[in-house]
């Protein structure tokens, strides 16, 4: 028997790494495995490996679904809000768009445990980080409430917003700007 006699006719959608297979052919030839035996062994190995891979994929999908369902149960009606907070925290802690995209390509970005960590991390962020995101409800205000509050601040003669010499004037201006972001999201 010659090494050239060790050929494979793969079954179904099986795929083989040619470099690895060349090394296996050499080992099979050296061990005295006949070409037809080699082909049968490799096909059975590939078939079994494919079945195991499919089972692992199903198990991973089932586990993912169970974890998401667990988060939905834990967070209840706040599930969507918690997801938005986690997303904002993700953007705050990883501000570079390219880095975020690379992270998301790993699949970790949709991992329920990572989402839970980010939602918990969002608790560490100050309230003003959330102003202007989404529908405005993350800051605890609807767009209408934000507009009303901004107008109230601007209309008050005694508020720091109206007094450029007040130590809190700059913060008051930023607050009004953030309120307008909620009232008129982009």
Image (cartoon, rainbow, N blue to C red):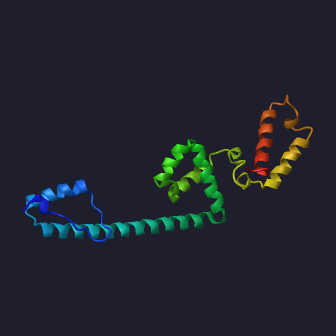
Question: Relative to residue 90, is residue 74 depicted above or below?
Answer: below
Q: Residue at x 72, y 51 (%)?
A: 139
Picture coordinates of residue 123, whole percent (x, y): 63, 49
In this orientation, which residue lies closer to the viewer: 149 or 43?
43
In this orientation, which residue lies closer to the viewer: 121 or 85?
85
Picture coordinates of residue 85, whole percent (x, y): 63, 53
Left or right of residue 123, residue 141 in this image: right
In this orientation, which residue lies closer to the viewer: 34 or 67?
34
- Within the image, what quadrant is residue 178 found in? top right
Picture coordinates of residue 127, whole percent (x, y): 70, 46
Residue closest to the far front: 4
* Numbered label tally: 0
Left or right of residue 177, residue 103 in this image: left
Classify the position of the N terminus by image quarter.
Answer: bottom left
Q: Is residue 166 visible?
A: yes
Q: Is residue 168 visible?
A: no
Residue closest to the far top: 165
Left or right of residue 33, residue 50 in this image: right
Left or right of residue 117, residue 144 in this image: right
In this orientation, which residue lies closer to the viewer: 60 or 169?
60
Question: Relative to residue 86, is residue 97 depicted above or below?
Answer: above
Question: Relative to residue 164, is residue 59 depicted above or below?
Answer: below
Q: Residue at x 66, y 62 (%)?
A: 78
């Amino acid at each position: 028997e010659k090494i050239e006699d060790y050929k494979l006719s793969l079954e179904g959608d099986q795929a083989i790494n040619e470099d690895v297979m060349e090394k296996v052919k050499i080992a099979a030839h050296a061990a005295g495995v006949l070409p037809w035996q080699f082909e049968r062994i490799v096909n059975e190995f590939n078939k079994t490996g494919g079945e195991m891979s499919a089972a692992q994929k199903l198990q991973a999908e089932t586990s993912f679904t169970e974890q998401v369902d667990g988060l939905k149960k834990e967070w209840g009606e706040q599930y969507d809000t918690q997801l938005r907070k986690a997303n904002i925290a993700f953007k705050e802690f990883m501000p570079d768009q390219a880095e975020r995209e690379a992270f998301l390509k790993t699949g970790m970005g949709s991992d329920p445990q990572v989402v839970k960590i980010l939602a918990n991390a969002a608790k560490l962020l100050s309230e003003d980080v959330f102003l202007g995101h989404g529908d405005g409800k993350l800051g605890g205000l609807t767009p209408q409430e934000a507009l009303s509050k901004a107008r109230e601040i601007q209309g008050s003669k005694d508020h720091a917003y109206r007094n450029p010499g007040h130590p809190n004037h700059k913060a008051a201006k930023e607050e009004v700007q953030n309120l307008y972001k909620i009232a008129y999201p982009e």
